[in-house]
Image (spheres, grey):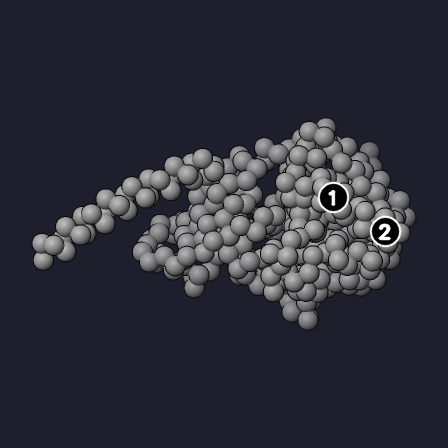
Amino acid sequence: MCTSIVEIVGAQGSGKGEDGWFDLTTAVVSYDHPHHALLEEAITIDFVNSALGPGARVAVEITLESAKGLLAALARAIAAADAVESERLRGT
Amino acid sequence: MAYEGMIAETISINGNKGEPISAYVARPLGAGPFPGIVLIHHAPGWDEWYREATRKFAHHGYAAISHNLYHRAGEGKSDDVAAKVRAEGGVPDAQVIGDTEGAVQWLRAQPYLTGKVGVIGTCSGGRHTFLFACHTKSIDAAADLWGGRVVMKKEELTPKLPTAPIEFTKNLSCPLLGLFGNEDAAPTPEQVNQHEAELKKHGKQYEFHRYDGAGHGFFYYDRPMYRIEQALDGWKKVFAFFEKHLNK
């Protein structure tokens, strides 16, 4: 990579790759040369299982603007989900 | 019509500390002798473009080898393997130097070699090319194509990349070709100037060419950064440089 922008965070859940669903261990976010998107640099997000080899990967390559939109959407969805969970906790 | 043919195949070579790594080799058919070229692949991986570039050098009369710096990350499609390496913070500089020396020595052991070897790389491979040329006495020419992070800020240094390659300039052991786009962000034109100043300071033999209207990766015909005029001129400069220094 020609930038050193890489952020790594644990990820619990599942991802669907070329060979079907697999358990996730990690999400890797970087700003780097994309392999497929016709951009010079892209925000790339890889959901991987680091124990299963390089092919256990769900990848996206999106523009910086798209990534900002995704971040905002995530924030809204998470806030709404937190509200639902708080409600659920009050009901128990 | 003269008969033309080449052989291209994957092989295993001894990399850093004698560890086996994979490599792709291509050369014209026939006894030779051929000058040698080592291609150091870019950050996007040991991929189809590097296979093509290896065969391009064979087409031009070289015995060429492109070794797989990402071999240790496991088998897989080149983009998946490159993503794994990216998540691991890249490959260690010391390992790259050892792997590349292995590729040079593999070439030097072949009966069809003239005895001259050049090294070329693009993107991170350009950086690795310069770094290697500062750590070996075994090559005769080196071509750094838009290698980013030859100049590095202190905060960019990591255990795998412990020293900015520019710090090794005084040890550069062979003539250097540099091709850069003036719209590149890594390396920036200012960083290219800084590198050139260091080469001048140490009296090194080099030629730098800077292209207007081009950024990073302007040879890659399948990417939006492709700039046909600059790429065609750049390839001419690459082949002229190696013809001059490898005594074709």
Give the letter of the chain under mark 2. B
Query: In the rendered structure, which disc, 2 or 1, sits on the residue that comes first in sequence?
Result: 1
Residue A58's x, y, as percent? 41, 49
Residue A16's x, y, as percent? 35, 50
Secondary structure, mark 2, is helix
Give the letter of the chain under mark 1. B
Residue B75's x, y, as percent? 53, 59
The 10 Å Cα crowd at callout 2, few under 14, some 14 to 19, many 20 or more, is few
Question: Is disc 1 on the same chain as disc 2?
Answer: yes
Which quadrant would the C terminus of chain A be assigned to in this image? bottom left
- Left or right, B240 with respect to B56, comes to right
Residue farthest to the front, as pictured: B154
Q: Which of B43 and A88 is in front in this view?
A: A88
Which residue is depicted at the point 84% across and 40% down?
A: B240
Residue B218's x, y, as percent? 67, 36
- Left or right, B21 with respect to B5, comes to left
Can you say whether B223 is above or below B14 in the image? above
Residue farthest to the bottom, as pictured: B17
Which residue is depicted at the point 61% across and 55% down?
A: B156
The amino acid on which the numbered mark 1 sits, given as a three-letter code, is Val
Residue marked by disc 1:
B192
Which residue is depicted at the point 79% across and 38% down?
A: B209
- Left or right, A40 with respect to B215, comes to left
Q: Is residue B124 visible?
A: yes
Q: Residue B201 carries which label?
A: 2
Q: Is residue B37 visible?
A: no
Which residue is depicted at the point 45% across and 56% down?
A: A8
The amino acid on which the numbered mark 2 sits, given as a three-letter code, is Lys
Secondary structure, mark 1, is helix
